Image (spheres, grey):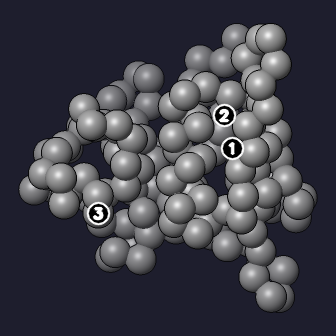
Amino acid sequence: MQITDPIADLLTRIRNASTAKHPSVDIPASNLKKAICQILVDEGYIKGMKVTEDNKQGTITLTLKYQENGTPVIAGLKRVSKPGLRIYTNCEDMPKVMKGLGTAIISTSKGVMTDKAARAAHVGGEVLAFVW
């Protein structure tokens, strides 16, 4: 099966697993997906990440994070820039998710980073996703 948008597949797998209250989710690995998942771990949306290498593609296992009452920490995930419509921004017009409470994931020339880190580094790029 050929996936045309692997980032949307990543976000959908996380969204579906957290809605179904699964403790973890497996995702086919790529360098871009690893970078996005590392941002989610660093920002506190996901408990942990483990990369399993095999002779082919490899697998990312994400341990999902839930609040005390059992609701997922990730309230929403949204794919912004799609293969049919790419969305780019500069550092001055960087979007704020939920008025600063959420995180925008940006692919820049200096790597994949959050909107706050991109503003601090004065770089723009492609807006991959919103997380809140």
The answer to the question of whether label 1 and label 2 lie on touching residues, with beta carbons closer than 8 A, is yes
Q: Secondary structure at mark 1?
A: helix
For the question of whether residue 95 can be seen, the reply is: yes
In the rendered view, tell whether residue 22 sits above or below residue 25: below
Binning the other alpha carbons within 10 Å of mark 1 as few (below 14), some (14 to 19) or many (20 upward) gives some
Q: Residue at x 51, y 66 (%)?
A: 43
Question: Which residue is labeled 1 in the image?
Answer: 12
User: For residue 130, which quarter of the picture?
Assistant: bottom left
Question: Which residue is labeled 3 in the image?
Answer: 116
Q: Residue at x 71, y 65 (%)?
A: 47
Residue 85: x %, y % from top left: 35, 28
Select label 2 or label 3 by which is in front.
3
User: For residue 27, which quarter of the picture?
Assistant: top right
Q: Residue at x 46, y 47 (%)?
A: 129
Residue 60: x %, y % from top left: 74, 37
Q: Amino acid at mark 1?
A: Thr
Among the two numbered marks 2 and 3 on one chain, the one whose residue lies closer to the N terminus: 2
Q: Residue at x 51, y 31 (%)?
A: 32
In the rendered view, tell whether residue 78 sits above or below residue 33: below
Which quadrant is the N terminus positioned in?
Answer: top right
Q: CA distance from mark 1 to mark 2?
A: 5 Å
Q: Secondary structure at mark 2?
A: helix
Q: In this view of the protein, which residue sits in the foreground, 116 or 110?
A: 110
Residue 88 appears left or right of 67: left
Among the two numbered marks 3 and 1 on one chain, the one whose residue lies closer to the N terminus: 1
Q: Amino acid at mark 3?
A: Lys
Select label 3 or label 1 by which is in front.
3
Q: Secondary structure at mark 3?
A: helix
Question: Which residue is labeled 2 in the image?
Answer: 9
User: For residue 74, which quarter of the picture?
Assistant: bottom right
